[in-house]
Amino acid sequence: MEEIIHSDKELLLYLNGLGSSGFDSFWIYMTKPLVWIPLYLLLMFLVYKKYSVKNFLFILLFIAVGITASDQIANIFKYGFQRLRPCHDPELINHMRLVTCGGKYGFYSAHASTTFFLATFLSFLIGRNYKFLPYLLFIWAIVVSYSRIYLGVHFPGDVAVGALMGFLLGGLFSTLALRYVRKK
């Protein structure tokens, strides 16, 4: 386990070190959930076009519950594992670029989890209707997730586990939602 943690720190220092102050504001912008409201509205419109109003409302409820679950499970892990964020790790502070910092603990990334949840959930629900949508959604999730490493608030392992959890939750919730929608 020590070797994995050491490799995670080395990869963080490498990826974080690729940044420059000229790009900092871009990555700070990319990490903010409110920036993506136009995307969320577009995605909801695409879901609305495919499903009846009743099913659309049910899907919105499933998205809200899924995002909440994704976020809160991440918080349980953060306080359960209590792994310091890179920006709070005394071993790393003097060796990395600090752009911003979050709470004390960071395992695992809720940003990665929620964006991968949405990408997976919506890919299963409407991906067949819009050929390139799943690719675009996963690129978006990767960009948001990478922003967390760039900013120094998560280790790559935090982001990878968050992405995996989001993918699994998105798959589970989309399976349940599709069962409901197909019954109607």
Image (spheres, helix red, strand yellow):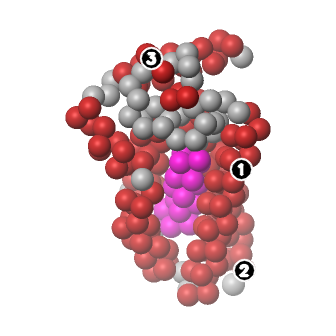
Q: Give the residue pinned by disc 3.
A: 94
Q: Is residue 123 magenta?
A: yes
The crowd level at tag 1 (other Cα within 10 Å; few <14, some 14-19, many 20+) is some
- Tag 3 secondary structure: helix
Q: Residue at x 39, y 70 (%)?
A: 42
Q: Which residue is drawn at 69% across and 54% down?
A: 72
Question: Mark 3 is on which residue type?
Answer: Asn
Looking at the rendering, the stretch of residues picked out in magenta corresponds to 110-128
Q: How far apart are marks 2 and 3 (CA)?
A: 57 Å
Mark 1 / mark 3, whichever is N-terminal: 1
Q: Does the magenta stretch include residue 119?
A: yes
Q: Main secondary structure of the magenta part?
A: helix
Q: CB under 8 Å between callouts 2 and 3?
A: no
Q: In this view, does 95 lie to the left or right of 21?
A: right
Against 60, residue 131 (above or below) is above
Question: Mark 2 is on which residue type?
Answer: Lys
Q: Is residue 131 visible?
A: no
- Tag 2 secondary structure: helix
Residue 109 picture location, percent across and down: 58, 42
Residue 71 picture location, percent across and down: 64, 53
Mark 2 / mark 1, whichever is N-terminal: 1
| Nearer to us: label 2 or label 1 | 1
Residue 116 picture location, percent across and down: 55, 50
Q: Residue at x 63, y 18 (%)?
A: 5
The crowd level at tag 3 (other Cα within 10 Å; few <14, some 14-19, many 20+) is few
Question: Looking at the rendering, which quadrant does residue 112 occupy?
Answer: top right
- Quarter of the picture containing the N terminus is top right
**Circle on res. 183:** 2
Q: Give the residue pinned by disc 1.
A: 73
